[in-house]
Amino acid sequence: MGLSGLDIFKKLPKTNCKECGFPTCLAFAMKLAAGQAELDKCPYVSDEVKAELAEASAPPIRGVTVGVGDEAFKVGEELVLYRHEKTFFNPTVLGVLVSDDMDEAKVDQLLGQVKECVHERVGVMLKVRAVAVKAASGDASKFKALVEKVKEVNRPIILMAEDVELMKAGLEAAGDVRPLLYAATEANIDAMAALAQEKGLPLAVKADDLDKLAELAQKLVDMGLKEVVLDPAPRKPGETFKDLVAIRRAALNQKFAPFGFPTITFPCEETQDELYETALAGMYICKYGGIVILSHAEPWRMYPLLVLVLNIYTDPQRPMAVDSKFYEIGNPDENSPVLVTTNFSLTYFIVSGEIEGSKIPAWLGVVDCDGQSVLTAWAAGKFVPEVIAKFINTSGIADKVKHRKLIIPGYVAQISGELEEELPDWEIIVGTREAADLPAFLRQFSTS
Ligand code: SF4
C-alpha cells in the first residue's frame, strides 16, 4: 500500500527551500503521493529515505519499457480509470504475431504489413509498434532464425517461449534489443524470473484465472522484479474484458501491488474470425489493454485501431498543437501566396491539406494560439491583429516573398482593417471561411 502525502511529508527535510519546484515540502509530498512529482527533485533526502519513498511514490501501475532507441515503447504508468479524470499516458501498443511454424511466405507477408503500416495523422506517426515472435515448433534453431529475421523490421520484440532453454536461444538471437520475455507461468516461474533478472529484462506473467495471476505476480514482486506485464489468459472475450477491468480497478482503487503492472492481450488467440478479432482489439484498447497482439496488420484492420488509440490517449485537457512558424506547402517561391492561421493541429492539417490539393504552392503561417481554432482563438484574444502582426514581422516571411499580400481566414474578416494598420506594408486579403473552398480561391488568387 502506498504512503499518504502526510506520511511522505514526515520523511522530508521540512525546510521549504523550494528547490524541488514546489513552494513547500508539504506541497511536494502531496504531489509525490499523487504520482505527479519525482522524488529526485529534492536533493536533500537521504538514500535510506529515498529507497523507502521511491517505493511508496511509485505510480500505482508501473511503467514497462520494451525495445531500445527511437522505436522503444513504454506501457503502464496510468493513474486513472477514466480518461476524463485526467488523461491516459502511454498508448496501447499494437503488435503482430509471427511463429516459427509458419511458412516463410506467411512470415514475409506479416512482416511486410508491419513495415508498411505507418500512417501520419495530425502530425503523429501511427504504426504497428511490436512483433511477437512465438517458439511454436520447439526447434531452437528455427526460433533463432525467425528472431533474426524479425529484428530486420526494427520494432520491439516480444519473445514467446515457455521453455526456458528456448527462451535463451531466442534471447541469444535477439541480442541487445531489450525484448519482453513472454511468459512466466506456474510451471516455469522460477527459471523464467531468474533469466529476466539476470538479463535485466521485462517479463510477462500468464495465468488463466485472476487468483493464480495475482499469486504469480506477487511472487515476481517478492523476487524483486520491477518490470512485469500481466496476461490474464482465459482466452475468452467476455472473461478477458472483465479481467482487464478488474486488474485496473484493483491497481488503482485498492493499490493491489501484484496487479500494479500493464497488461498484454491476444485477440488473435481468441477467435479465427478476422472481423471479430478486430472488434475485440478495439474493446481491449478501450479497456486497459497495454499491449494488444493481432494476427495480421492490413490497413483496413490497423488504421481504425490506431486512430482509436490516438483518440483515447490524447490529453482531453490540452489541444493538439503544431509548431508556430511558416510552413512550405509544395515548393513555394517569392511569388507564392502567403496565408496565416492558428496552430490548432486539426486546423493546420485541414488547411495545409486543401492547399496541397490545390496544387498551388504556398507559405502557410501558423500563429501560436495555444492550440485553439481560428474563431475560438479570436474570441480569446489570441488570434488578433497585434499578435498576427508580431508573428509576421518576426517570421522572416518578408524576405522570402516579393509581394505583400496576406490572406487571413474568412472567419476573422472583421480584423482586416485593424491588421492593415498593424502591418502597413501589407495588403490584407480575406480568404475563405471554409478550408474546402481554398483550392478554388487560390486558383483565382494566383491568376488575378
Ligand atoms: S527541495 Fe526538498 S527540502 Fe526543499 S522544499 Fe522541496 S521537498 Fe522540501
Image (cartoon, helix red, strand yellow):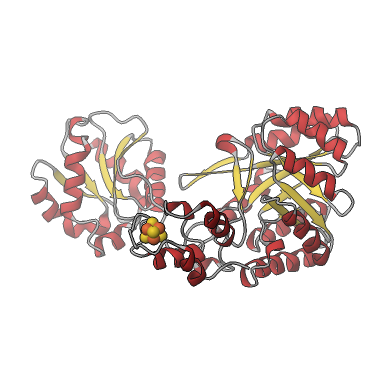
- Place of residue 350 in the rendered image (x, y in percent of width and height, measured from the top left): 41, 49
- Residue 248 in view here: yes
Q: Is residue 278 visible?
A: no
Q: Position of residue 340 (x, y in %)?
A: 26, 46
Observer-nearest of 8 and 150: 8
Q: Is residue 372 left or right of residue 257?
A: left
Going by the image, does 233 lie left or right of 367? Answer: right
Using the rendered view, name the quadrant where residue 445 is placed.
top left
**Residue at (19%, 42%) from the top-left corner?**
392
Q: Nearer the viewer, residue 162 or 382?
A: 162
Quarter containing the C terminus: top left
Tell me where residue 150 appears, x and y as whole percent: 73, 32
- At a point 45% along the width and 65% down the height, the residue shown is 29
Horizontal and vertical percent for residue 315?
A: 47, 59
Please tell me in which quarter of the rendered image ligand 1 is found: bottom left
State the residue at coordinates (27%, 58%): 411
Question: Which quarter of the picture shows residue 279?
Answer: bottom right
* Quadrant of the snapshot with the N terminus: bottom right
